[in-house]
Image (cartoon, helix red, strand yellow):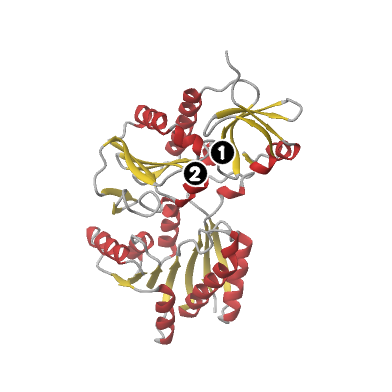
Amino acid sequence: MSAPPTVVVTRRAVDRLRGGHPWIYRSDVASVDAGAGDLVRVVGERGRPLGWAFFSTESQIALRFVSAGAAEVDDRALLSERLRDAIAYRTSLGIDATAWRVVHGEADRLPGLVVDRYGDYLVVQTLSQGMDRRAGLIAELLVEQLAPQGILARNDPKVRRLEGLDEHVEVLHGEIPPTVLVREGAMTLQVDLWRGQKTGGFLDQRENHAAAAAVGHGRALDAFTHQGGFALQMAPRCESVLALDSSAAAVEATRSNAARNGLGNIEVREANVFDELRELEIAGEPFDTIVLDPPAFAKNKAAVERATAGYKEINLRALKLLRPGGVLVTCSCSYHVGEIAFLNVLAEAASDAHATVAIEEKRMQARDHPVLLTVPETYYLKCIVLRKIA
């Protein structure tokens, strides 16, 4: 029997693994006897076995660990067990929706793999060489365990370029319709799995939609509405909701979703949110509830300074528009702008707005997008609920 592909790593890599982080960077690889996407045996420089990982020939993240110890790992058995565990966890959550995340990469010990469920259909993203090489096996196991009508590979994120992988969208199993109807709480939404954001929708905000609905009241504003996730949930509790987005497709989707759910108190405008917030301030139009859910302003460290300025501006405008006693639900999905940095931005915005503001709640991504304590990269979505006292 031939020896398995092997990678030798440095002492610094060993210390990183002991700290609980599953990534080993290329700079900490001492020697390699492996190919692209191989499941490799990882050893220290003195030959001590450390475990098994997927190897990448292109990414700066050279190794993504999947198992500790010396015992050899079987691809099918490992993937099958991990998928079963991930599904069991989501089932235990009692999610009041038909769309949810099945696999959240490293947080489910399946690094580089994302699987989302939209009713009877699954959307898969294989974001590393190791997972991409096993896409067919993953689809086969998902069919066995979840029996979907179709599986779509949404392998169009630019992050795949870091792994030397191409960008494409293809059907892995069954058929995928142009759009799919899913339920979130009492609301029904139409989702485009082929061309929609991420895998079709922002499933990580589902629980925050409900939280916003719980505090929403009076005249509400939903900025960066996308498909109307926050607006739809708040509308039954509010007198009116103004939903803003710069995308014509998002505006049309929100209008369609509002009509589908019989919500006549949602007004949707196609507008640059930064400009519209200024115009609303100039016009002296107050709101009782405001939601800010912008796209990631900082997709890398170099963009943090500019992103911080953007976050400050929209939160400053929102606090000026908010009536005393009103609630601001403000979000950041930029991993590179951490929670403390985001809170500092909000404090500066409140100071410049001459507003007295209290934190009612600090939230994060939905529970089907777990956060590992030792892997800070799994915590990216911050959602802060603020109350304007005066």
Task: State left or right for residue 7 relative to residue 289.
Answer: right
Q: Is residue 90 above or below residue 49?
A: below
| Quadrant of the rendering where the C terminus is positioned | bottom right
Mark linked to residue 164: 2
Is disc 2 surrounded by few (<14), some (14 to 19) or many (20+) residues within 10 Å? some
Q: Is residue 197 left or right of residue 371?
A: left
Q: Position of residue 326 (x, y in %)?
A: 47, 73
Please give the count of numbered marks on the rendered protein.
Answer: 2
Which secondary structure, mark 1? loop
Local SS, label 2: loop
Given residues 79 and 1, the one toward you in this image is: 1
In the rendering, at what x and y percent does residue 187 appear? 30, 54
Marker disc for residue 57: 1
Whether residues under marks 1 and 2 lie with C-beta atoms below 8 angstroms apart, the answer is: yes
Q: Residue at x 53, y 70 (%)?
A: 311
Q: Amino acid at mark 2?
A: Gly
Q: Nearer the viewer, residue 271 or 287?
A: 271
Q: CA distance from mark 1 to mark 2?
A: 8 Å
Q: Position of residue 287 (x, y in %)?
A: 41, 76
Which image quadrant for residue 12? top right
- Is residue 218 shown to the viewer in this render? no
**Residue found at x 37% / y 53%:** 201
Q: Mark on residue 138?
A: none
Query: Where does the image place residue 97, in percent across and percent down from the top left?
Result: 35, 46
- Residue 307 visible in rendering: yes
Q: Which callout, 1 or 2, points at the residue further toward the start of the chain?
A: 1
